[in-house]
Amino acid sequence: MGDRRYADHENRTYIDPWDDESSLLLLAQHHDGTVAGTVRYQWRQFRPFPADELYDFHHYTALIGCCGPEVDRHVALLDRASVLPRFQGLGLYPNLELLAERVSHLIGVKLHAGLVAHENARMVRILESLGWRKTGRDVTYKGWAGIELYKLLEPASGGR
């Protein structure tokens, strides 16, 4: 993808190799060229999650009705979601997420999963407003603490 502006910080740029290897990367761009928001997903069938042990795959297998390697085809990890402060509150992220759900469903993904930092209560509220649920598990990893959430994707029947 190359060098572009962080969607959560207007004054710094980055080169993120995970963008080039992501399964799905959606960018919302302002007419002035600013990347206003991003959402990135990883599909397990293409690339293992960075820390599989953080996710409750036993819970997911029960939800989607399959197990073993079959789960890899049907679970996607929300890897990054951000919107520049000046574009927050306009519904940009919910629209990016809904588009990601439609694309995911088209390739057979049945469940989105993600970890959100405890201090990011706003993101938890946004995800819950979009139908995500908490698994009830708190997760800690290398000094980071968060909440595990998931969403079963509905069949693409025109929906929202």
Image (cartoon, rainbow, N blue to C red):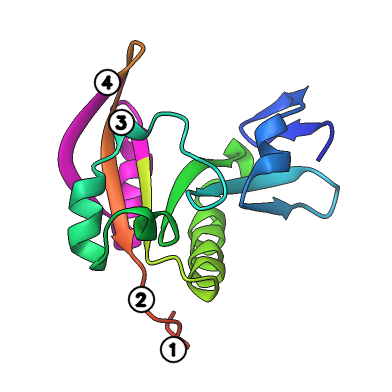
In primary-sequence order, the first of circles 3 and 4 is: 3
Q: Amino acid at mark 1?
A: Ser
47 in relation to 30, above or below: above
Which residue is drawn at the image coordinates 17% and 36% (left, top)?
137
Within 10 angstroms of label 3, few (less than 14), some, or many (20 or more) residues?
A: few
Secondary element under disc 4, as helix, strand or loop, is strand
Cα–Cα span, label 4 and label 1: 37 Å
On residue 100, which mark appears? none
Residue 143 spot, x, y in % from top left: 33, 11
Q: Nearer the viewer, mark 2 or mark 3?
A: 3
Query: What segment is highlighted magenta in the picture?
Result: 115-140
Q: Which residue is mark 1?
A: 157
Q: Depth check: 68 or 110 in front?
A: 68
Q: Could you tell me which secondary element the residue under label 2 belongs to?
A: loop
Residue placed under numbered mark 3 in the picture? 53
Q: Which residue is mark 2?
A: 154
Callout 3: SS: helix
The three-letter code of the residue at mark 4 reads: Thr
The answer to whether residue 132 is left or right of residue 25 is left
Provide the residue designation for mark 4: 140
From mark 2 to mark 4, how far is it between C-alphas? Answer: 30 Å
x and y, in percent, of residue 96 in the image: 56, 59
Distance between mark 3 and mark 1 Cα atoms: 34 Å
- Could you tell which of marks 2 and 4 lies nearer the N-terminus? 4
Q: Is 78 part of what is drawn in magenta?
A: no
Q: Considering the numbered disc 1 on the image, is that residue within a helix, a strand or a loop?
A: loop
Q: Residue at x 62, y 38 (%)?
A: 84
In this view, 26 is above or below 148? below
